[in-house]
Image (spheres, coloured by chain):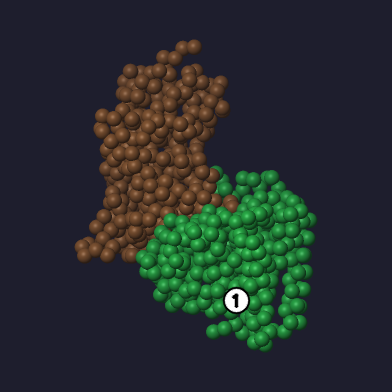
């Protein structure tokens, strides 16, 4: 099977869907690039090159460069989705959610319900999250928790190239507004990705390692950190279940609970601030529904409750690291009443 | 081209329907039969009517918190609307929207929007669909003078020009954004002149005269349909009621409302002109008034008698499929 990067997998999902469905469009800032310039079109293909090549194939009516205007991009995508198109709108950095959130959570997410089931909003918001690139407080955040809490939105956090393609195809075909959170640390990572189209259902977790001692749940790139930790600890005879929920909304609660029923110990990792986050949410679900199975307190490994600092030494301390995950696993294993 | 007899009678009927609808829901609100907040369109009828007469079910509109009139003018079912506003089964939005989210999606009325300035970006999208799919439809966002100051409106106007989509930005300047005068809140000399800064033409119209609003809206719709890109309209008008029902309107001048209700009553202006132009007789208009009154009464009576939505509907239609 061919090996493809996360970037290629996402690009391929869009291109294949656009070939078979003429209502799919891509809209955003520099999704092609070069509009109105003397130089080349498709100069960027998205700031990370994820949409590169779509413009030459599908043209300017379906790959639409916009001004820097996030509210209008999200609103236009929502209005277009209500009237016959299936837009893939790019929100360049997830940090920019603050600029345009009204059009997502008050508009797109609510059409169907607020209008009694007579409207729909089949749009995808592709966005990029993740710290560690020294992007500072406004170009580094993963705000998955802010969209996960909104009824009407679905939220997808692909952690490898194979999942990214299958989940994006599912997202484009879905009739609701889907927030597709790409981790910018993963664009260069690769794995086997089939050439043909395939879908991965929402709300079905992926068991990446099976173990009996501790359950580790990760979101976005923290899943890959959890895998590295689990593999190291396996050499010591510590066996971890590593679960990637793939989507935080809907959330596969059942798989997490089933695993905790076996291991009795849960470590949840995300790269978000700790209050009201995804880790906190999963923790409360397990505490409510699997309290009797727990043999140790649930441990959350999250970022610190501060804006994301710029200096590498500070940012590294802000982010959850493999060493933090390992320490948490050892703590729950060593817990005695 | 001005309204002919048949068109005028249709326009008059629509305006009268909106007026009676608004006064009836005001009464029912006073009696405690309507929960929540109510923002009435009474006084502004000639604007929604003049615009929507130029549109078909394939054209799109988005509206504001003051949206009943737009919904009726776009062909929304008055009985279903009454039920929705009274929070009853069979309502346009199944009891999940209410007055501020009234909609008739099947008629191209994509929804009233209770976020001031929430609608303009959406209509750029509807107009983008029309352009991309080549349907020939146009999109109209109804926004108030209040919404004209929101950043989303500016972004939407700019993007509409950049993408050259068939969108009409209709600004209904009723003089007040809640309890603050447009003269204070709109920094430019008027709203229409802002359009030029975004690169689109704008028209101004007396919003109390149906003959004028129809003609001006027709120009704007023709402009969009012929592929000339977006256009803005500023219609000056007043509102007969407060920002919301229950608003004591202490911010309005002494005798102001009374005077404006006399001078800017679109129904009276329409009748006077029509009779003078021999487009209608007093008797014809009276007959319409009588029919509309009965129609509204029937809708209200049915809504009052209808049961509340079933609580089993609470979680339906959050998502398109099982969640």
Give the structural element (helix, strand or loop) at label 1: helix
Specify the farthest residue to the front.
B254
Residue located farthest toward the left when viewing the structure as drawn? A39
Q: The brown chain is which one?
A: A
Give the quadrant of residue A118. bottom right
Q: Where B308 sits versus A35, above or below?
A: above
Q: Which residue is drawn at 71% across and 67% down?
A: B20
- Decide which of B255, B140 is in the foreground and name it: B255
Q: Rate crowding at label 1 as few (under 14), some (14 to 19) or many (20 or more) other CA atoms within 10 Å.
A: many
Q: Residue B231: x, y in percent?
A: 44, 71
Chain in green in the render: B
Could you tell me which chain the residue with mark 1 belongs to?
Answer: B
Where does label 1 land, which residue? Answer: B210
x and y percent of residue A275 in the render? 46, 31
Q: Residue furthest top?
A: A337
Total marks in image: 1
Which residue is found at the position 33% from the left and 31% from the top? A319
Which residue is found at the position 66% from the left and 64% from the top?
B255
Quarter residue A272 falls in = top left
Q: Which of B229 and B263 is in front in this view?
A: B263
Left or right: where does residue A172 sit relative to residue B29?
left
Foreground residue, B306 or B197? B197
Residue A209 is left or right of residue B135, and the answer is left
The answer to whether residue B287 is seen in the rendering is yes
In the rendered image, which quarter contains the N terminus of chain A?
A: top left
Does residue B240 appear in this view?
A: no
Q: Where is residue B168 in the image (x, y as percent from the top left)?
A: 48, 69
- Against B317, is A55 above or below? below
Q: In this view, does B81 lie to the left or right of A102?
A: right
């Amino acid at each position: 099977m061919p090996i493809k990067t996360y970037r290629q997998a996402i690009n391929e999902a869009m291109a294949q869907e656009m070939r078979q469905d003429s209502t799919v469009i891509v809209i955003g800032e520099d999704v092609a690039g070069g509009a109105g310039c003397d130089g080349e079109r498709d100069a960027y293909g998205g700031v990370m090159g994820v949409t590169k090549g779509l413009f030459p194939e599908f043209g300017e009516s379906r790959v639409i460069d916009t001004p820097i205007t996030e509210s209008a991009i999200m609103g236009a995508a929502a209005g277009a989705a209500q009237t016959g198109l299936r837009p893939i709108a790019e929100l360049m950095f997830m940090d920019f959610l603050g600029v345009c959130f009204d059009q997502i959570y008050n508009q797109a997410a609510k059409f169907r319900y607020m209008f009694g089931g007579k409207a729909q909003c089949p749009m995808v918001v592709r966005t990029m999250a993740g710290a560690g690139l020294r992007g500072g407080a406004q170009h580094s955040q993963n705000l998955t928790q802010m969209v996960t809490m909104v009824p009407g939105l679905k939220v997808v956090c692909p952690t490898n190239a194979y999942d990214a393609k299958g989940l994006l195809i599912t997202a484009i075909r879905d009739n609701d507004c889907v927030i597709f959170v790409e981790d910018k640390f993963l664009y260069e990572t690769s794995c086997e990705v089939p050439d043909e189209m395939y879908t991965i259902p929402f709300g079905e977790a992926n068991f990446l390692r099976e173990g009996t001692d501790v359950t580790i749940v990760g979101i976005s790139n923290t899943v890959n950190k959890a895998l590295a930790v689990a593999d190291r600890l396996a050499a010591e005879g510590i066996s971890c279940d590593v679960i990637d929920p793939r989507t935080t909304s809907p959330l596969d609660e059942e798989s997490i609970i089933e695993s905790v029923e076996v291991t009795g110990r849960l470590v949840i990792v995300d790269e978000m601030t700790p209050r009201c986050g995804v880790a906190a949410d999963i923790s409360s679900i397990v505490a409510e529904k699997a309290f009797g199975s727990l043999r140790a307190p649930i441990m959350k490994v999250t970022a610190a409750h501060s804006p994301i600092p710029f200096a590498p030494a500070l940012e590294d301390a802000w982010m959850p690291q493999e060493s933090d995950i390992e320490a948490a696993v050892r703590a729950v294993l060593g817990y005695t009443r | 081209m001005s309204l002919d007899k048949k068109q005028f009678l249709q326009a008059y009927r629509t305006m009268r329907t909106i007026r009676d609808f608004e006064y009836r829901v005001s009464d029912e609100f006073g009696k405690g039969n309507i929960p929540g907040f109510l923002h009435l369109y009474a006084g502004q009828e000639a604007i929604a009517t003049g615009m929507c007469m130029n549109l078909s079910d394939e054209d799109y509109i988005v509206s504001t918190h003051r949206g009943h009139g737009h919904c009726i003018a776009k062909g929304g079912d008055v009985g279903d609307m009454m039920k929705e506003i009274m929070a009853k089964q069979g309502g346009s939005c199944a009891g999940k929207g209410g007055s501020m989210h009234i909609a008739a999606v099947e008629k191209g009325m994509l929804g009233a929007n209770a976020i001031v300035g929430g609608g303009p970006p959406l209509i750029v999208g509807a107009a983008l669909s029309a352009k991309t799919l080549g349907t020939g439809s146009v999109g109209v966002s109804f926004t108030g003078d209040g919404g004209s100051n929101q950043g989303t409106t500016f972004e939407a106007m700019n993007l509409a020009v950049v993408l050259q989509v068939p969108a009409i930005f209709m600004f209904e300047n009723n003089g007040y954004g809640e309890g603050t005068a447009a003269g204070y809140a709109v920094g430019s000399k008027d709203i229409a002149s802002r359009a030029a800064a975004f690169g689109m033409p704008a028209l101004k119209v007396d919003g109390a005269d149906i003959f004028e609003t129809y003609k001006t809206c027709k120009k704007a719709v023709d402009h969009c349909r012929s592929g000339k890109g977006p256009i803005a309209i500023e219609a000056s008008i007043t509102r007969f009621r407060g920002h919301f029902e229950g608003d004591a309107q202490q911010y309005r001048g002494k005798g102001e409302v009374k005077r404006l209700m006399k001078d800017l009553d679109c129904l009276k202006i329409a009748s006077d002109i029509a009779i003078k132009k021999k487009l209608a007789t007093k008797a014809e208009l009276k007959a319409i008034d009588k029919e509309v009154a009965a129609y509204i009464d029937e809708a209200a009576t049915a809504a009052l008698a209808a049961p509340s939505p079933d609580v089993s509907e609470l979680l339906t239609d959050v998502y398109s499929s099982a969640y």
